[in-house]
Amino acid sequence: MFERELARICGLYSGLTVIFSQGPKDGGGDTMTVLGLVLEILGSCKVEDSFRRALDRVDGLAVSPAMQIRQSIAKLVASDLALLQRNFRRHSFGELATSQTLQSIASTLKPTSLREEMLAHADDELRHSKLFSALAKSLQQSTGYTDCEDFSWILDDDRRFVENYAGDIVEFICNVFAAEVRSHSFVTSYITALRADDSAQAKRICKVLARILDDEGRHIGYTGRYINQWMASNLDLAESLERSFKAFDRNSWVDIAGTAQFFYERA
Ligand SMILES: [Fe+2]
Ligand SMILES: [Fe+2]
């Protein structure tokens, strides 16, 4: 038992060594700060100083290094079609879970514009889930790799979240906002990595990812505008944002462990 666990840890370690040896060597679009990204998306909207400070703070905490690591991983993933297939299938579960959660939480609200925007958002995430699933299936035709990894825990986690939801919609929107920044950054990092590949397949994947990226930008936009309005009416959301970004940063490490596990199991 102990030997098996030790072998697993050693395998994960060697997988991580592969990941970090790729290193973010050439900057690229994914190194934008959270504040820079949000300001670009919110455009002409007047962004509260308190919101700017909160976003600056999450960058200083952990998100920025995680983005750089994600960029390194995306390069590695893009160079291994079976891994790309596995990750796209994993994202299809993540997008489905987000869609179901948004739908459930929106249904607890009275009819408001926020509820309508959340329901439209849930439709977008369901479409993303189908797009990622279709991309994974099309890659399977090239790789011949059958991915049997069990991702049902992603749906279970979100189901538990909904069961324990205590009705704090402001905290929830901070969470969704952080999740959307994370989605935007991982889709950007795939596009950046795949652009180095001149093949028709890479171009086709980039086209689909660009459509998803547009939606993720809109999701950052509407959640960011609500947070900005709430902060303008003196609600201090710095701690909620910090909690949300830390939680999604932890998720990034779970993703990194999953990628390392993939290398370990194929070794
Ligand atoms: Fe999405
Ligand atoms: Fe999204």
Image: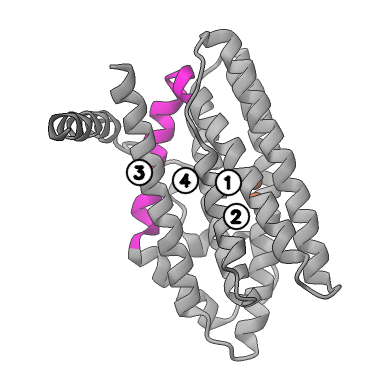
Q: Amino acid at mark 4?
A: Asp
Marks 4 and 1, Cα distance to the nearest angstrom? 28 Å
From the image, which quarter does the C terminus lie in?
top left
Residue 262, placed above or below residue 234: above
Between tags 3 and 2, which lies in front? 2
- Which residue sits furthest right? 111
Q: Specify the segment rendered in magenta.
A: 62-84
Q: State whether label 1 is within 8 Å of ligand 1.
A: no
First in sequence: mark 3 vs mark 2: 3
Residue corresponding to mark 3: 69
Question: What predominant SS class does the magenta segment belong to?
Answer: helix
Query: Residue 258 in the image: x percent, y percent?
Result: 38, 36
Q: Amino acid at mark 3?
A: Ile
Between tags 1 and 3, which lies in front? 1
Marks 1 and 3, Cα distance to the nearest angstrom? 25 Å
Q: Amino acid at mark 2?
A: Arg
Residue 54, placed above or below residue 82: below
| Residue at horizontal 44 percent and vertical 70 percent from the top | 243
Residue corresponding to mark 2: 159
